[in-house]
Every structure is written in structure tokens, then in C-alpha cells.
Image: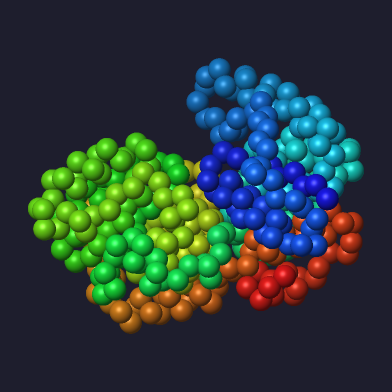
Amino acid sequence: MRVVIAGGGTGGHIYPALAVARSLRARPESGLVPPAGIPLHRLALRSLRTVDRDLHLVLDPLRLAASVPQAAALLARVRPTAVFTTGGYVAIPVLLAARPLGIPVVLWEGNAIPGRSVRATARLAAAVAVSFDETCRALRAQRCYRTGTPIRDPGAVDRAAARARLGIPADGRLLLVFGGSQAVRRFSAAVTGALPRLVERTWVLHVTGDAGYAGALADREALPPASRGRYRPAAFLADDMADALAAADLLVGRAGSSTLAEAAAFGLPLVCVPYPHAAGHQRANARILVEAGAARLVADEAFNAEALLDAAALLDEPDALATMRAAALAIGRPGAADAVAALVLAAAERRSWPGPAEVERIARGAGA
């Protein structure tokens, strides 16, 4: 069995793809042999979100057109038994190329409001996996399952051990600030303004991105020596992000599908600041957790140092945090990667699709 996984653009597409790849590799029935690494092939196209009237308005359609035969040649050479794609603009040439070759595609869409690429191509997929029920209602798909967002396994991380690895005292309260993989300047500015007062009440683990890291280091050096160690900036956490999620008492972050899914699966109370662009996808994502009682929402334009301090004040409300934690766990789908992998295997083996109840059972973490 051979599976091609197509995704890219941002971490919101890449990390779910990797989570499903890990689940597929772990299944003895899949017949997949884990190689040293995953071979990477790039297509000619780039993001189709261009809004400026520049050269890309002309080049983007040409890149997209060139990517379809490029994807077809790749699929014809690799001859996969199935394709899994995490949506976005990469899904367009892959779905268009796979259909005439008779290769079934499982498409995942993580936003409550599906993106343009997914809306245009979902009907070409053999099955669609989504994170929110609203998404299924918006798509014209042959079959649609609510699996949740594929994430790292929260059960693989012990909270006490994670805090020890991060150097957080057992009785210390930890605020995790994570602006996602794009547009983190507003988060960096808020942390800079609030930092002297933040470290008086909590430890702060701040994921800055490359652009904000140097400034965060300067902010740390400006703190009094006695409190300097309570601020931990990091450009990226990569594999250490699981420790950060397990160790934290409160997360302040964007409302990307992966951020919301991981907060829910880890039972981590969340104050979310939706990215204001991209057709309002993140605000729609956040609304579902807010209505469930697992998150609170701050508008992007209102997020500043004072708003961050207000968010951190939740750490002084243990009952509110406990309520949010329980609500998060109630809606979490820690087995989403396994649920999506089950769909991919069904497509690859040309067998009957699992029923919605079975997919829900796996997504809830009951095992594949």
C-alpha cells in the first residue's frame, strides 16, 4: 500500500498531515513501511489568496494550470493506492489529477467555513473529513465525516513530567502565548506591554516566531533579574509544543483549527484572538468553542497589553478554569488522526466506508 499526502502553506495544513502520517505508519494492517523520512515533492503553484493587483494575479492561474499535469505525473509515477490532502490550494491540482487516474482521495477541511479551494473541489473527493458539523452542511461531498482536527497524541505527555522538563515549578501557574505560524506581531506587542506585570503573577511561555524572537529576548533582559527567569520566549517549540500544552494552565492564541483542537484535547482553557482576515474562518472556528464554554474570545483589534492582562486574570479564577477545562475535554477529539487514517485505509483498500458512529468513536479516542 502506498499513500500520497498533499498539504502545505501553513502549519494548519502541515501538522494535521503529519499527524495522519504518524497514525498510518503505526498501523500494522496498513502495510506501510516507515522510511527514514517522508519524500517531499513541490508543485508550481503558491497561495491563491492574492488580493493585490500585481503580477501574481496573472501568474497564479498559470501556476495552477501547470500544477495539474505536474501532480498527474507525480501520481502516475508513484502509483498510490490513495491520496490524503489537508485542503488549501494544494488540493486543487491533486484532486483534479487523481480523479481521471481512478485514485481515491480523502480530503480534510479544518475550518467551520470551508475555504474556496475546498468548496470548489470537495465533490471530487471520495470522502471528506471535517472538524465542525457546519462544514459538512456547506459542502457538496459524496460522504462527509466529522473527525475533528488531526493532532499530536495528548495521552503521550504527562503533565508533571512536562512541567519538570520546562523548568516550571509544580505550584507555578503557566500562561502559554502562541500566535500561530503567521501574523504574530500583535501578540508580540501585547506581551511587550504587559510583560512586567505578567511575570508578577505567572510564568510566561511565549512562542514568538522568527520575527519576534529578538525583540522578546530584549524584553526579557529588561526585566528585573529576580523575575527574568519567569519569561520563556521561544521562536518555535516543534516537538516541545506537546510539553507546553500539557504544562500550561491557560492558552492565549489564535483560533486556527489545530490550536483549537489541541486546546480541547489537552483540556486547556483558551482565550482566543481570531485572525481577522481569511474570510473570517477563525472567528467562526472560535465561536463553536466559546459557545461550548471552553474558550473566551477577544477581537483582534481589541487585543493589546491590557487585554492580555485581563486574559491572564483567569488564572486567579480556579472555578472558571475548571469549568472551561471540563468543557474543552467534552468536545475534544484526541483520536482525530486515527479517525482520518481509518478513512484513508478504507479508500486505499477499496472496502466499505466506516459508519459515522464508528468514526466518532475513534475520534473520541476509543481506538481504531
- Mark yes or no: residue 245 visible: yes
Q: Position of residue 127 (x, y in %)?
A: 78, 55
Q: Position of residue 129 (x, y in %)?
A: 70, 58
Q: Residue at x 29, y 62 (%)?
A: 167
Q: Residue at x 63, y 25 (%)?
A: 60
Q: Nearer the viewer, residue 198 or 213?
A: 213
The quadrant in which the C terminus is found is bottom right
Above or below residue 299? Residue 116 is above
Choose top left, top right, bottom left or bottom right for residue 131. bottom right
Q: Is the image coloured rainbow, by chain, by secondary structure, or in one colour?
A: rainbow
Choose top left, top right, bottom left or bottom right for residue 103. top right
Q: Residue at x 51, y 75 (%)?
A: 329
Q: Is residue 93 left or right of residue 289?
A: right
Q: Position of residue 186 (x, y in %)?
A: 32, 45
Q: Is residue 332 left or right of residue 219?
A: right
Choose top left, top right, bottom left or bottom right for residue 355. bottom right
Q: Position of residue 295 (x, y in %)?
A: 42, 67
Q: How many marks?
A: 0
Above or below residue 135? Residue 39 is above
- Mark yes or no: residue 129 visible: no
View extreme (bottom): residue: 319
Above or below residue 203? Residue 11 is above
Q: Residue at x 48, y 67 (%)?
A: 157
Q: Is residue 304 left or right of residue 268?
A: left
